[in-house]
Each structure stands twice: as C-alpha cells, then as structure tokens.
Image (tube, helix red, strand yellow):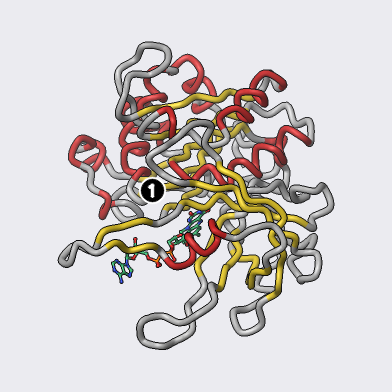
Amino acid sequence: MSQTDTPRERRDHGPELPEVKMHLHPPADPGVGVVVENKRCTARKSASFVRHVAIDVSKTSLAGNFRAGQSFGVIPPGQDERGRPHKLRLYSIASPSKGEDGQGHVLATTVKRTIDEHWETGKLFLGVASNYLADLQPGDEIRVTGPSGKRFLTPAHPEDHDYIFFATGTGIAPFRGMIHDLLDAGAQSRVTLVMGAAYATDLLYHADLLRLEQEHENFTYLTAISRETQGDGHDPLYVQDRLRTHQDHFLPQLETDRALIYVCGIAGMELGIFQQLARLLPPSRLDRFLRCDSKALSQVEHWERRMIHKEVAPTRRVFLEVY
Ligand SMILES: Cc1cc2nc3c(=O)[nH]c(=O)nc-3n(C[C@H](O)[C@H](O)[C@H](O)COP(=O)(O)OP(=O)(O)OC[C@H]3O[C@@H](n4cnc5c(N)ncnc54)[C@H](O)[C@@H]3O)c2cc1C
C-alpha cells in the first residue's frame, strides 16, 4: 500500500463496498407493495413530469433489505402488443438505506413519465411502466422485484472518502438516498452534488437539497442549467462545467485519494465529465479516475462515447449508472 492510500484500500482496487442483498424477489415471485405517497418532484410547472412515489414494502422481502444506490423492479399489469405479460422495469431507490420511514419498510423512487411521439406515424406513445407508476395512488398495490445492483453503492467505510455526485434528471434518485445516508450518519466527508437540468424549473427535490445544504456545512449543492442562464449569471452550463467554474472547490479534493466520483442519469453524460477531468487534471492525478494512454490523452476534444471502458477506462473510484 502506498503512503497516500486511504487505510482500507489499495490504489487499484477502489473502496471496499458493503455486502448487499440481491434478488430476494425475482420476476417470477414478485412482492406486493402498497403505494403510500405520490407527489410531484418539481416546485413549479416543468416540461417534464417527474414524481416521487413511495411504496410500503413491509409485506415483502425487500423490507429492511435494500440499500441506497440499489434498484428495484416494477412489473406493470397487463400485456404488451404481442400478448405477453409486461416485463419489469428497473427504478433506482431514492430513499436512504433506512427507508423513508426510518425502519426500512418504505422505499421511494423518482419516476419520469416517458412520453414520446412515434417517429413514423406521429402517434403519441406513453411509456408503460413509468406512467403506470406515476399514476398510482396511495392504497394501490404494486408488484415489485429486487433489490438489484451491488456496485453503485457508497463504500463500507464512508468516512474514508469525499464524494462528488453528478446527476441529470432522475439520476438524482440514488444520490438523494446516499446523501441522506452520509449526512445523517454525521460523517465529516465532503459531499458535493452537481445537479443538471435543462431549465431551472426541471430541478428535482430542489428545496429539500437547498435546506440540506443550509443544515450541513460539509454538503455543497451546485446546479447546472443547460438551456438558460444560471441564477448566478453564468451562461448555460452542463454538469461537467461546474468542475471548471468551481475549480477551487473540486481540485483540492481530486488531488487526494479520498475522492470518489458518482455519475447517474442520461446515457452519455459521463463523456463530458471524463473530458473535463482530463482537461483539468495532470496525468498523474487523472489516473486515479481514468486509465487512458498518452495517445487518447492528446485527443481529449475528440473523445467519443464508444471509447469509454476501452481507450478511456474509469477506475473503481468512478461509479457509473446511466440509462
Ligand atoms: C438501473 C436503472 C435504474 C433506473 N432508474 C430509473 C429511475 O429512478 N427513474 C426513472 O424514471 N427511470 C429509471 N430507469 C429507466 C426505467 O427502467 C424505464 O426504462 C423508463 O421508466 C421507461 O420505461 P417505460 O415502461 O415507461 O417505457 P417503455 O414502455 O419501456 O418505452 C421505452 C421507450 O421505448 C420506445 N417505444 C417502445 N414502444 C414503443 C411504441 N409502441 N411506439 C413508440 N415508441 C415506443 C419509446 O421511445 C420509449 O421512450 C432506470 C433504468 C435502469 C436500467
């Protein structure tokens, strides 16, 4: 172990992750939860419709057996156009590991209604599971599976690390849970959330996050609005641009072995973040987060998403969940 490594890890291996339960309810044997809350996640009218749906899972094996960062499955009722039962869709658990109720009996997710127009016919298409979930009312039953996921987690020894979370859209869901886990435990780690949205009205859980920032000195909440000027006067920004506008905040953290980077949201968002890291960090620092050879490094402006995991490989200090 090198002198700069945190006590419980070796440089190449990343942090030790906790053991988690998996697949207690497989698709063939779903549990039945009961919806206890369904409310909008945006403060004002927004172009996207995102809801916070809380489900009592106390009568299922999920009770007390999920962790922030994991997902659960939802099996919508009915059949697809081929007459087969609908397949499950995964949703991130947005609750802290102790659940919404503090007992692990109620979990929540952050669901965005999928609304689309069929490319050729122009007919309206409503996503099956997201609209089913978003329409449920308190008292309604819902078939759930899981939990699933054993890698997108905060470490077994959270106080050994600082955390940089990048979210777009419903990518906030797992971070809502993780941030509560970290702050509620009183860990003194630095925790930063960069939340991206097209318009300020699309920001999710915004008032709650502002309040958390007021209450916890070690929590920083930054927003990046991509289609309008920021509240602080900056031009439109993507999440990765906050690494540049707040270099004084990020660079000291990224220069230590404590920093972990988490990315969740729209598939493709990781590319911009990786490029920005490569622009800002010298190769000796960058290699904590990304493995890329000097040829790739010399062409940062031309990186493409297909290079990720090949020429540009995130290390185990980088946690990715994009969909
Ligand atoms: C690990 C993981 C975690 C996730 N977490 C979340 C989360 O926290 N919140 C969240 O909102 N989502 C999350 N998702 C995404 C979620 O699983 C679903 O994919 C999403 O909600 C869309 O599902 P749906 O059933 O509403 O849409 P579907 O019915 O599955 O449709 C999906 C897309 O298929 C196309 N399509 C399918 N059929 C037709 C048709 N007949 N005509 C036209 N177009 C069609 C449409 O473009 C549509 O956008 C997560 C995914 C993963 C993998």
Judged left or right of residue 250, residue 56 is right
Judged left or right of residue 57, residue 131 is left
Q: Which quadrant of the render holds ligand 1?
A: bottom left
Q: Relative to 21, is 236 above or below?
A: above
In the depicted view, which residue is nearer to us: 11 or 193? 193
Q: Residue at x 73, y 43 (%)?
A: 157
Horizontal and vertical percent for residue 47? 37, 40
Categorize mark 1 by other alpha carbons within 10 Å: few (<14), some (14-19), many (20+): some
Q: Residue at x 70, y 73 (%)?
A: 32
Q: Residue at x 69, y 36 (%)?
A: 160
Q: Which image quadrant for residue 175?
A: top right
Name the quadrant of the N terminus: top right
Q: Relative to 120, is 215 above or below?
A: above
In the depicted view, which residue is nearer to us: 217 or 137? 137
Horizontal and vertical percent for residue 19? 71, 60
Q: Residue furthest left?
A: 120
Horizontal and vertical percent for residue 156? 71, 48
Mark 1, residue position = 266
Q: How many marks?
A: 1
Judged left or right of residue 167, residue 258 is right
Q: Relative to 41, is 253 above or below?
A: above
